[in-house]
Amino acid sequence: MKVKIAFTTTDRIHVNAHFGWAKEIDVYEISDNGYEFIETLKFEGDLKEDGNEDKITPKLQALNDCTIVYVVAIGGSAAARLIKKNVTPVKAKSEEEKIEDILNKLVKTLKGNPPPWLRKALGQKKLSFAEELEKEATL
């Protein structure tokens, strides 16, 4: 299973941009085999905080096929609009958090037993207790 994960970034190394102000969003595709850079989405114009909800519409459309978007910060209405499109916004621990570290962690998590929020974001149903036991028996 492959999923697309997006990151708001100013340097293409760290998750260090506010969703609304981000001029660049890097998109990667991940699976339990690893990850691959897909594209950088670029956004023009005045993106400063001004309560102008229209400025996030192009971002919402561009992220339509992503499962998760990592941000340093996001406004409540933008987060709600993402969730409505089945894109889960996740806040980075800090502006120092590296995209590569998050990707490596996600790949490792996909190989194991993803936490409930990630399973939900990935559209996986939670395994029943019996299925969990069966899965562990095959490991």
Image (spheres, grey):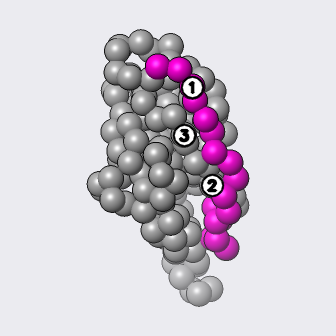
Residue bearing mark 2 = 28
What span is in magenta? 30-46
Mark nearer the N terminus (1 vs 2): 2
Residue 74 visible somewhere in the drawing? yes
Counting other residues with Cα less than 10 Å from the Cα at mark 2, is it few (<14), some (14-19), or many (20 or more)? Answer: some
- Quarter holding residue 139: bottom right
Mark nearer the N terminus (3 vs 1): 3
Q: Position of residue 121 (x, y in %)?
A: 52, 48
Label 2 SS:
strand
Residue bearing mark 3 = 24
- Quarter holding residue 89: top left
Asked whether 39 falls inside the magenta stretch, the response is yes
For the residues marked 1 and 2, what is the alpha-carbon distance in whole angstroms?
21 Å
Counting other residues with Cα less than 10 Å from the Cα at mark 3, is it few (<14), some (14-19), or many (20 or more)? Answer: many
Q: Which mark is residue 44?
A: 1
Residue located 46% across and 35% down the image:
22
Residue located 43% across and 56% down the image:
14
Point out the frontmost of discs 2 and 3.
Answer: 3
Point out the frontmost of discs 1 and 2.
Answer: 1
Name the amino acid, label 3: Glu
